[in-house]
Amino acid sequence: MICHLQKYLKQARIPLNPLTSRIRFHSSSENCSHVVSSSPIESYCSDGARLDHHQVLCVDSPRLPDIDVIISNVHVGSSEDEVFQSLKQDHVCNAIQPSHYLVNKLIHRFKDDWKSALGIFRWAGSCPGYEHSSEIYEMMVDILGKVRQMDQMRALLEEMSKGHIVTLNTVAKVMRRFSGAGQWEDAVRTFDELGTFGLEKNTETMNLLLDTLCKEGKVELARSVFLELKSCIPPNAHTFNIFIHGWCKINRVDEAQWTIQEMKGHGCHPCVISYSTIIQSYCRHYNFSKVYELLDEMQAQGCPPNVVTYTTVMSYLAKSGDFEEAIRITEKMKIVGSKPDSRFFNCLIYTLGRASRVQEAVYVYQVEMPENGVAPDTSTFNTMITMFSHHGHHEKAFHVLEEMNKLEHCKPNVQTFHPLLKSCFKTGKTDECLSQLLDDMVNKHHLSLDITTYTLVIHGLCRANKCEWAYLLFKEMIGHDITPRYQTCRLILDEVKQKHMYDAAEKIEAVMKKL
């Protein structure tokens, strides 16, 4: 029975469907309660109306999935302890038996909201009969490290150590996050403490540390660590490839070339990865004459380029605007007999799209990929959606999303929706179309909106003269501890002032002072 809800929606001219009103209902045989998201994305309707909690009455419906029950009890801007207590004190949540699959989905859903993720993690860990797997611990460790919550990350690492579930993957994530935070000594100390985690100091773990330092641009520090360790830990080809990548990353290609000679001196043979890394460095500087020299050298050394090498060269030729030369790379690859993969085809589709050869790109997608036994992946669909949206074929872009939704092995990510969101603003469909996309992201695919998505939508709504909705999203963004860009603050501030929304203007100015 719809009760007064249908009447309210009819009066507010809001259709009773998921397009514009994201209302989630829960009922049981004993009682009837409503669950409404506090998110502005979920409660803002096409004509600007918002649903008040007291105006939503219960309807007869099946029991909500466990994941939605838990999500409905997680409130934006809450501390991890508040989230934990909210879940712990809810009788419906207490009746749920967590599983690794459920907790994995929930933590992934809140991966950009560390407080909510940690609160859910603690709640699940407190449930009788459930213990976190090392994979779920590692997810949480990585989330905390990403937002520089180092004390919390250390605490989880200690829990894992007591449970004897620290893996090489755990150590790699911890060292990477310490390095990303500029805490180099802590990264090296983690390596020194491997024995306490039941792990060995060997070539593999040394390479993890060196790779972590090099990826953060601390190649000279990695080099000094290597010189200290190489007397007791023998390097292998991967060790030198790490340094080749590191030197190229900081634009010191000469050292990368010298490392190839050092590699030979240690009895290791340069491989296609060694040369391809240097080729990529030359590509980044658009030095294609050097690129072709190295391609010839690889052939002469009996180490022919592979599909990754050719994909890299094609990608950078396309970025340089030389689309025809980029497309000709496919012929060079056929000569050496290298088999194309999904990344190669994705790059080719992108290049053809940029060259305005849309029909040829569609042919590659519909014919050449199946003929070569290559299944489309998320990047393939994203590339097709972006191409159609760029050329104004908005309906075709949405049709590609429909195709994607039918597949089990390939799901949309946040990047999938960016060109579609832009299409909504380009076509002026900022009501039902935009609401549907945001609903699919948050509720259907359980994606967390990142700063790029918030910025895109807020800017679009401001330009579409819908600053009230934009401001609701701005508040939600702040509630998720996502720091807005100054340009976003400036834009929405000007818009709310024009609408005489002075309270909103004060809050935006307060945020700007903290930037």
Image (cartoon, rainbow, N blue to C red):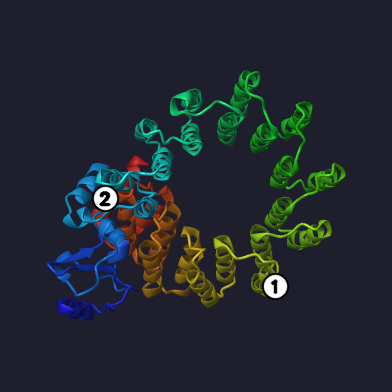
The image quadrant that residue 220 belongs to is top right
* Circle 2 Cα neighbour tier, 10 Å, few/some/many (<14 / 14–19 / ≥20): few
Q: Between 15 and 159, which is closer to the camera in this rendering?
A: 159
User: SS at mark 1?
Assistant: helix
Taking the spot 26% from the left edge, 67% from the top edge, the residue there is: 24
Say left or right for 52 vs 197: left
Residue wearing tag 2:
506
Q: Residue furthest right?
A: 300
SS at badge 2:
helix
Q: Earlier in the sequence, mark 1 or mark 2?
A: 1
Q: Nearer the viewer, mark 1 or mark 2?
A: 1
Q: Residues within 10 Å of mark 1 (few under 14, many from 20)?
A: some
Q: As drawn, which residue projects farthest toward the left? A: 30
* Residue 384 visible in the current orientation: yes
Q: How far across and down, in percent of the image, does residue 402 sit? A: 49, 73
Query: Relative to 248, does residue 99 appear above or below in the rendering?
Result: below
- Is residue 12 positioned above or below 177 on the image? below
Residue 437, how many percent across, how many down? 41, 68
Residue placed under numbered mark 1 in the picture: 360
> As shown in the figure, which amino acid type bears the numbered disc 2?
Glu
The relative height of residue 46 versus residue 237 in the rendered view (above or below) is below
| Residue type, numbered disc 1 | Glu
Separation of marks 1 and 2 at Cα, in angstroms: 53 Å
Residue closest to the eye, 109 or 99: 99
Corner quadrant of residue 464:
bottom left
Q: Quadrant of the C terminus?
A: top left
Measured from the top left, where is residue 393 in percent x and y? 56, 75
